[in-house]
Amino acid sequence: MRRYVARRVAAFVATLLFVSVLVFTVIRVLPGDPALLIMGTEGNPEAVARLREAMGLDRPIVVQYGEWLLRALRGDLGVSIQYDVPVGALIVSRLPVTLPLTLLAAAFMILAAIPLGLYAATHHRRTGDYVTMVVSQVGIAVPSFWAGLLLILLFSVRLGWVRAGGFEGWSEGLWTGARSLLLPAIALGFFQAAVLVRATRSAVLDVLREEYVRTARAKGVREASVIAKHTFKNAMIPIVTVAGIQLGQLMAGSIILESVFALPGLGRLALGAITARDLPVVQGVTLFVASSIVLINFVVDLAYGFLDPRIRYD
């Protein structure tokens, strides 16, 4: 167990290091000069050169990366060019929107997808199975931003049940804040739920064909017990694997949905930073999202042994 965890931790650290190199390199090769952007079009070349030197942009990219990495390990992601505040503080200030949005979308994904996938598998080649597969295919085909616009048109414009966008804040109450995130969470989780439905159906169907399931049924075990104890439990590995991937995509996918619903989260912060060429913010947000995805996959890897005792750690 310890050797397995140590290997996974080493892989986790190596992946984070690779992600940091990739993020830093991609951001640095983008067109545009941050120093020139700060000084404006009227800045003279001497002043721009002095500012580039003060920001360390005149140094070799390897030196810049090493200094940035050392600061990042201490929790210092730099200072925003736009807002003139630490990037870490900006990220923390936007998490009360992005994190609940991701969790609500994940809850919708799991609560909708797993029961539907189980139902489709246990009603294989029947009407319920076909209807579920058609609905999931629609979910895969419809982009999240388009689903968000359709939800706004129906529930905000036509029915007037919720606001079309914006975030009222948690200070107004738990339900008030959750209501602002409800439609974007459904739009964000719709595609991921459609994928998870198919993964659940496929995993459960594979287990239902196993000999021990047929033996349990032949012994007269109730169908509910066959599904709960013998089938679903043994189908958890592929389901958890796909769900872990989907959770990471929910975090990344919130960037577009936050713009559609005018939510002040990490997504809008990142898009604004890209437009303004605010490199520290772009690097910080990208690194945070990528690290979150790597961490989710790390937790999924560790969960395998608890879900299936047949997995060996050596």
Image (tube, rainbow, N blue to C red):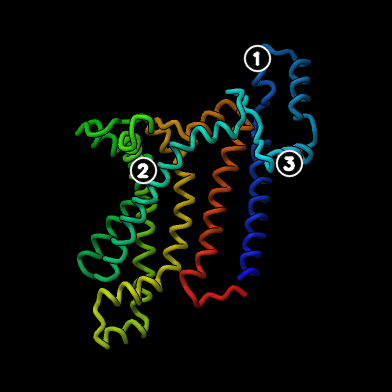
Q: Position of residue 92 (x, y in %)?
A: 53, 35
Name the quadrant containing residue 54.
top right
Q: Residues within 10 Å of mark 1 (few under 14, many from 20)?
A: few
Give the alpha-carbon distance from disc 2 to disc 1, as whole Å.
41 Å
> Which is more toward the observer, 180 or 194?
180
Label whose residue precedes the other's in the sequence (1 or 3): 1
Kind of element beneath mark 3 = helix
From what the image shows, is residue 78 above or below residue 26?
above
Label whose residue precedes the other's in the sequence (2 or 1): 1
Q: Residue at x 43, y 58 (%)?
A: 243
Tag of residue 185: 2
User: Which residue matches tag 3?
Assistant: 70
Q: Position of residue 228 (x, y in %)?
A: 32, 72
As drawn, is 240 to the left or to the right of 276?
A: left
Q: Residue at x 78, y 15 (%)?
A: 46
Callout 1 amino acid = Thr
Callout 3 amino acid = Leu
